[in-house]
Amino acid sequence: MLLILLLALATVSTAHAGLNRLTVSYIDVGQGDSIWLRASDGTDILVDGGPVSAGPTVVAYLQQNGVDNIEVMVLTHPDADHVGGLIDVLESTIPVDAVVYSGQGGTTVTYNRFVSAMQTVGLTPTPVSAGQEYTWGSVQASVLNPQSTPASDPNENSVVLLVTYEDSRWMLTGDIGAGTEQVIVSSGADLRADVLKVAHHGSAYSTSPLFLDTVQPGYAVISVGTNSYGHPAQVVLDRLAGIGAHIMRTDELGTIVLRSDELAAPIDLGYVVLLPVAFRPAASEAATVQIIFIFYDGLEPYVEGDEYAVIKNTGGVPVNLDGWRLNAGAPGQDFYFPAFIMQPGQECRVYTNEYHPEYCGFNFESPSALWSNSGDCGYLYDATGQEVSMRCY
């Protein structure tokens, strides 16, 4: 799915002789963040990579758009839904010149795999902190967070960037909450931005009225997928609507692409927006994916992370699994699929707590066994919540 939006983010003098443009893609990775910025001088910046299962989606998107080198990779914080997909990028054929991060590492298997992938290609991440300024090609980036005294919560320690390109300004917020927003506002920095990446997927504990009054975004992008957290919260949507921001969500629109174009003709509103129809698979396509096998008695003692369920596209057309859900037989035992195109005849495994990219890379990330050895049922639901397959053993 791809939504293309062409924006003129500022009134620009006709004195400019060349076409200068920053293209920002908010890649649909389901419940997570992955943002790719490309300047007209060829500078490529990747901010986060979504969950592990979205890695192939991110790599494919970059390759389809001709990315042959990433000048800067930014990891906002070590949560799995931000760092996971970066592993595939580092292991791909796309070279990465530099990695910057909050300075706060993680202890999860996913984060350790990210560190190993960096080491394999000879990269050492550079910590950043509030007050630093970077020039990446023709792109300027002001670091607004983390603070000099780190927060204990990795979310509050997220790298926050105010990206400036020509006269356009873009706020990237990671997963910060209202407390960190207040600290950033109290710094006295000019926080006005044309486009705001809404913090923490639209959590009710972020995007405070104070922060919005200060940033005053014309556009607000929410990177979110099917989730059990209530993201985006209605109170956040109401706040954004209250300041007149145009709200765009990846769970509704798919990948969102915004372009600042200096040569766009000035108009009173300051924006030129073209919205082609977004594509979603027809409901008839969805019913062709079935659970065909459940390996319920894992070989790992106690935790049985090597359990898995196998799903197969038994139909003749590709199916986008974005927003689909696999339930392991009990409330709360759910795996939510990211944006992933399942080809006709393709089989994928969803492991309890192992990562196998050769089987699509899906993983409940459960610390304990899910499938009962005495009998259980698995349920597969499409993006509308309709049950499309059940398998019992």
Image (cartoon, rainbow, N blue to C red):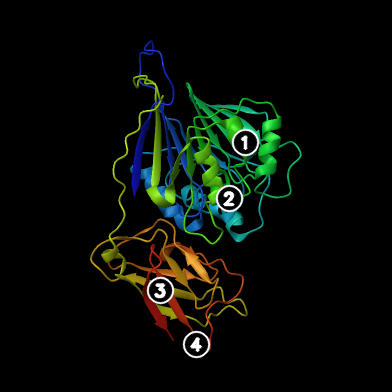
Residue located 53% across and 44% down the image: 238
Q: Quadrant of residue 42?
A: top left
Pointer 3 and pointer 1: residues touching (CB < 8 Å)?
A: no
* Amino acid tagged 1: Phe
CA gap, disc 2 and disc 1: 14 Å
CA gap, disc 4 and disc 3: 17 Å
Pointer 2 and pointer 1: residues touching (CB < 8 Å)?
A: no
- Report which residue position mark 3 lands on: 310
- Report which residue position mark 4 lands on: 375
Q: What element carries label 2?
A: loop
* Amino acid tagged 3: Val
* Amino acid tagged 2: Ser
Q: What element carries label 1?
A: helix
Residue located 42% across and 54% down the image: 56
- Report which residue position mark 2 lands on: 203
- Report which residue position mark 1 lands on: 211
Residue located 70% across and 50% down the image: 153
- Where 34 sits versus 10, above or below? below
